[in-house]
Amino acid sequence: MKDKTSSTITSKQLIFVIIGSQIGAGIFALPRMVSGKAGEDAWISVVLGAIIPFLSVFLIERLGRRMPQMGFTQMALGLFGKNVGSVLIILFIAYVLLFESLVVRSFAEIANLYLLPKTPLAVVLLFITISIVYIGSKGVRVLARLNEILFYFGVLLLFILIIPVGQADYTNILPVGEAGLKGIARGALTTAYSFAGTEVLLVFYSLVNKQEEVLKAGLIAVCITTLLYLAMVITCLLVFGVNNLQRILWPGLMLLKVSQVPVLERLEFIFLVFWMGMGARPAVNMGFAASLSLSQLLKIDEKKYNTYALMFIALAIYILALLPHNLLSVFKLWDYAGYGFLIIGLGYPLLYHLAAFMRGGKMLV
Amino acid sequence: MFKKLLLVFVIVFLVFSISGCWDYRDVNKVSFPATGAYDLHESSIAAARQNQGEPLVDLTVIIPNLAQDVKKPFRIERTTGILIGNARGQKPYSSPGTYSAGVAAVIILGEDLARAGINNMVEALFRGAQIPKTENFAVAEGRGEDVLRAPIKDYSNMGEYLKGVLKQSEKRSFIPSTTLYQFGVNRAPGKNPIMPLLTLKNQKVEVTGTAIFKKDKMIGKANLDESRSLVMLRGIEASGNIPYIIKKDGQILDKGSVDVCCGGRKVKMDCNGDKFSYLITVYLKGSLIEHEFNKNFIQNPDLHKMIENQIAADTKSDCMKFIEKMQQEYKVDCIDINKYILAKWRKEFQNQVDQSGFIENLDIKVKVKMKLKNVGELT
Amino acid sequence: MKIRPRKTPPTADARDRSIKNIPDTKLPVALSEKMQLLKPYIEKNYDIITHSFYLEGNPRLEAVAVYINQVIDIEILNLHILKPLMLNCDREDLLTSGSHTLIETIYKTSITASRIAKIANLSSLVQTIFDGITILMFDGLDDVLAIDIHGGKSRNIDVPPAEQTMRGSREGFIERVDVNIALIRRRLRDPNLVVEKTLVGRRTRTEVAILYIDDIADPQIVQKVKDRINQMDIDGIVASGYVEQFIEDDPSSLFPQVYSSERPDKLVPYLLEGRVVIIVDNTPLALAVPALFVQFLQAPEDYYERTLFSSYIRLMRYVAWIVAVSLPASYIALLSYQPELLPYDLLISFSKARVAVPFPVVVEALIMEIIIQLVIEAGLRLPQQIGQTVGVVSGIILGQAAITAKLASPIVILIISVSVICTYALPASSLVLSTRIIRLPMMMLAASFGLFGLSFGAIIFLTHLVSLESMGVPYFSPLAPTRFSDLKDTFIRTFMWKMNKRPVSIPSHNPQRQGNTGEEND
């Protein structure tokens, strides 16, 4: 029980961890990005885009089932040997660093834009980084519980989306199918990128206590995320229309500013206050996964030094997050993170399957 | 180690919190405008009318005075700049305290500015993350500044008065309120915004109709009667009082007025070759407010039907008149029907619908369905 | 989570040796020798009374009673021990048959006192005297009789002053552990209710009773509680708070992890839910573990009143807690960082109210907060009448004067007062204390970063709450980890007849609480 890192989470909590890793600040920009590619058919793209994370969950689960006792690092070292395996793990950590620095940076930009316009970004980022380290240092069980309670908060919060529906115009999502297959496919790919975070399952698989339920949990998680994305995209389309969406940086947040609610003059401020936990959540989950992998790779005592590994990861995220010149370059980097997701989320499990198939059950280490 | 780091952090932050951080501003040192008016600067009106030169704009705001021993309850400040944001940026030179944009509930646009196009002016409002998109817009005949400077006695300032008149005005009258968001959305292809029109009459500010926009440029005015038809045709759920007179053979049978609530519209579109035809069905329902005393609904069972028919007929002819005016004078789709074409053939017509000649060639028919819900407490 | 390192329990031997090195000599037969041995330990104490008397007969047998004044019931001693011994005892018999019949004889013929034991060596004799037990020594017998006739003056069972209810019982715990246990026994006549007793404190040797229901409570938790109490190595405890601080999981947390109450009717349902109750002698507050966060927002009336009303009140308490923690902080954040969040008219009236105050909002709020905290502290220790005066003076005169002196705006006084009222609407005094403290860091965070700081503070506190454990049980359950079946008794309190299962947040090995009568009937 006191054993921090090697303790387990339930498969129900795994759902929330996966959702928590997927949904970040990206959900606010998603309607713009998808509708830019798929126009009025953005919602079809969202549905289709969910195929890739589904596939990813499926592949990772099969991989885990093949070698149920092994964690992510053990698997890499066992299948590919020490050198190649280490490179794979370091690549994974590097991907987490890049990806989460973007997540954290986007969230800090939002906080900076709406709540603290004059405060330096470095300070806002510092506070987000501190919360990452603090949460991560409490161990995986606390992480899972926090994801759980934040999920319920988040769902309640997204109910706010109902408020602007009064302004909706249904002709904004008509006609159906105008974007064509190509447009929809491109939109679907964009959506798939925003499912990045699914690959957290690579590390968390071995931490789940009932591994036979992992597939179900993973699929439920992807379903819930898809539904939330779908709700966001459809609401934004209905309220703004494709043309206007292209001009709005964070349509999801602008949504809160279009209708007047008595007493709560500024819905978006209140929303952001409660979103704080949600904004840092992917970075917390993925950062924890990375620190766990790092301490396993370095063969240091996980219980004792995981917090230090996490501090190192968080520091790296902090520095990386400060590097992009502005938000626009962050958006450009998002695409690379998306490729990264495809490589880690689909490529890694495939590669592992292949290696496991070749080895025929024999391990190198 | 982690705890020690945390401790250092706490100390740093205690120092911060007392001294106040970057974004700190005391509420009583901030000026909160109650309302603002955007105008073309006097020197550039003439040039702007001929579409020449780069106009300067005036930003006039009403700011309530906070100190208790000051006699005037508010002050009016005016600054000038190349755009609204720039004019706002001139404030610190003439006004103490931080200026908080975006708390003003109502923005008044001068007519000249509205006719010159306001896309550039409202950009600052859309871009500002601190600004909600629910500010109400209205166009003033003449200068918006004059509306703000009009003497006001019964309210603490003009902002309060305008807010009361304009916020959700469609709930009480046939004047549509337009927020920044609605204005923005209605600039999309196939749509055009409208705004309430204010007039300064005998030192008193009144709503006198609707300003019709083509995208961001004001192109015409509709008076109060036309506004009513406009609102009904647009399908805005507005309500207000409509009078009726039932005549038969030149003789007045009954007259009175009905509180009508517009329950939306239904649009049916047909396409014959390349000619589009529309059938707009307007649904009204209402309750009788008053009518001539000598008629009794129980003894005159047809009366109910007659009132309904009369109002439907009146409304229909008003609407037809308005559509005619729209097609001939405004030449712009201000009743928001082209979106139905776009909903079917968006790619094909996206660029066509807003070109001149498109709305004029539409065949628009109107049907009005009126339902008298109740007749009040008397028979 | 940081867990306080716990030492291995000291052996019973080590504990007994701790007072003085009393030699373990066997007691001699002659009374005078016994007295000689005992003398150095008791002669300095004025309150230890040695009472010599003769047992009737020829020759008379000399005996001595040793006891502490006012700790024993002197009436029982005189009437039921001394008098029968002096008058009715058959001395010959005693001497011939030896000490083993002594107890029996006294027990059956002479004494109506309850607990009697024999003592044979010096160290336990001394210890027994100081434990407040009456000693009888006889000339010619090596064994010494120890008779437990605890008594003396103690407080009557009274209305618990800090936890009063409208509909519940009026009985509160008192300072005597045996009476307190009886108060619980009277309400819970289950043969499975186990009452275990240990002595804690090297010098004070305070009785600590551990109560649990054998077939409900989780044995792991019971064992954990026992272990932690046994591991306590302290020279003295005078209140249950000592025990609380030794057994809680995270001592540096702001949140109470052990529930304490002075109401037996509050603890009996906890026993029934599988919790362990700890009663410490000389303290009218009993402890219950494992404690959950939501438990501190629940009051016994919740179960005495009807469902709808108690659910409403319970919801209000959650609101009160959130308001108490965050209202002053929100005020600071709103007025100095995000004033646009307020409705325009309110904004102007707030600005107008503050226009004469020269301090920043945070300083203004801090001044008022500190004044109010001191007023509370001042009123707490004073006699009731003066305490009320302090309250009135501070409430009316200080507040008014602060406004007139432009030290604070009326709004900040309103805000701070509301938060204080909300704090005291909470039913558990330990949560009240933690709420009073949490307010401060929240205010500081709000003063530094506005709403962002507020939400940062909220997430840190949420993480902390979620990470806490009480006896290994997640402290923030049933919220996280979410246990849906327990939510019907969390924010609301559902119908009594619907609560068929014990809460799953507290591990127990008998989940069924009551029959399914309610569901069958509809």
Image (tube, grey):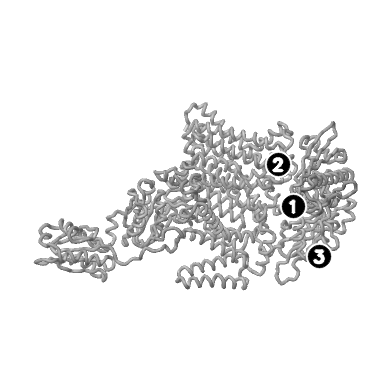
Around disc 1, counting alpha carbons within 10 Å, would you say few (fewer than 14), some (14 to 19), or many (20 or more)?
Answer: few
Gap between marks 3 and 1 measured at Cα: 40 Å
Q: Circle 3 is placed at which residue position?
A: B151
Q: Nearer the viewer, mark 2 or mark 1?
A: 1
SS at mark 2 in the image: helix
- Which quarter of the figure has residue B92? bottom right
Of residues B367 and C434, the one nearer the viewer is B367
Q: Nearer the viewer, mark 3 or mark 2?
A: 3
Q: Please, which chain is the residue tagged with disc 2 on? A: A
Find out whether the residues at labels 2 and 1 contact each other: C-beta distance under 8 Å: no
Quadrant where the N terminus of chain A sits is top left
Around disc 2, counting alpha carbons within 10 Å, would you say few (fewer than 14), some (14 to 19), or many (20 or more)?
Answer: many
Of residues C308 and A257, the one nearer the viewer is C308
Q: Earlier in the sequence, mark 3 or mark 1?
A: 3
Gap between marks 2 and 1 measured at Cα: 43 Å
Identified at 51% across, 60% down, the residue is C425
Residue B13 placement (x, y as % from top left): 57, 59
Mark 3 and mark 2 on one chain: no
Q: Is residue B187 visible?
A: no
Q: Residue furthest left?
A: C58
Q: Amino acid at mark 3?
A: Pro
Q: Please, which chain is the residue tagged with disc 3 on? A: B
Residue C184 placement (x, y as % from top left): 36, 55
Q: Circle 1 is placed at which residue position?
A: B376
Q: Is residue C447 visible?
A: yes
Residue A347 placement (x, y as % from top left): 59, 33
SS at mark 3 in the image: loop
Is residue C169 toward the left or the right of residue B275 in the image? left
Q: Circle 2 is placed at which residue position?
A: A237
Examine the rendered structure and indicate whether residue A365 appears above or below residue B25.
above
